Amino acid sequence: MAELRLPPTTDSVPAARRFARDQLRASDADVDTAILLVSEVVTNAVLHARSDFLLAVDDFGVRARIAVTDGSPVPPRLHNFAVESATGRGLRLLDQLALRWGVDPGDGGHGKVVWFEVGTPSAAAWESFADGMLAEGLPGDF
C-alpha cells in the first residue's frame, strides 16, 4: 500500500491524481475510472472535511482499492441535485462506477475513511451511468 498525506487545498486534487496514477501504472484495474473517482473523493475531502487527508492506494492486479481518510466524522451522502447543478455528481459517479465503496470510521473514532474499489475496465458500468444521466434529462439543448 502506498500513502500520501495532503493538505485541504485545490492543488491537492491533481497531486492525488498523479500519485494514484503512478501507483497504478502497472495495474490491470481500470486506472482511468480509478483516477476519476480519486478526483471526486479527494475533492469532497477538500471541500467538506477541510482537514489534511491521507490517500492510500492498493493495487491487487485486476482490482485496486483506494481510500481517503480525513478529519471529519460526517459521512458523505448521495443527493438528488437538479440537472443544471454544477455539483453533486461525485458520489453518483462513485456509486455507479466503483465495484464497491463505503465509509468507515477513522482510527480511534476520529474522522472517516471513504474507500472504493475498481476492477478491470468495463464499458457496462459507463453505459449504466450514461443511461441514468439520460433518464434524468440533460440541461440546455442536448
Image (cartoon, rainbow, N blue to C red):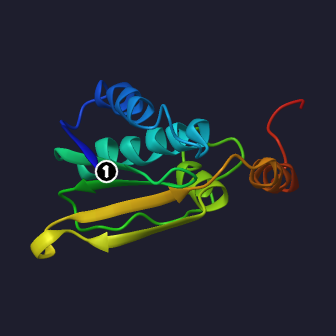
- What residue is rendered at 31% in x and 50% in y? 48
Q: Amino acid at mark 1?
A: His
Residue at screen point 82% across, 41% down:
138
Image position, residue 55 (x, y; %):
29, 46
Q: Residue at (79%, 50%) from the top-left corner? A: 133
Question: In the image, is residue 55 above or below residue 72?
Answer: above
Q: How many numbered discs, if any?
A: 1
Quick one: 61 or 120, which is closer to the camera?
61
Residue underneath mark 1: 48
Q: Bin the neighbour count of mark 1 within 10 Å (Cα to Cα): few under 14, some 14-19, many 20 and up.
A: some
- Left or right: where does residue 5 sit relative to residue 95? left
Q: Secondary structure at mark 1?
A: helix
* Foreground of the two, 27 or 69: 27
Q: Residue at x 72, y 47 (%)?
A: 83
5 in relation to 102, above or below: above
Q: Up-down: is 68 above or below 26?
A: below
- Image side of residue 35 versus residue 69, left or right: right
Q: Is residue 71 found left or right of 24 in the rendered image?
A: left
Residue 26, percent from left and from top: 50, 34
Of the 4 image quadrants, the one containing the C terminus is top right
Viewer-proximal residue among 126 and 86: 126
Q: Position of residue 131 (x, y in %)?
A: 85, 53
Can you tell which quarter of the image residue 91 is in? bottom right
The foreground one among 71 and 38 is: 38
Q: Farthest residue to the left: give it.
A: 108
The x and y percentages for residue 72 are 22, 61
Residue 108 appears in which quarter of the rendering?
bottom left
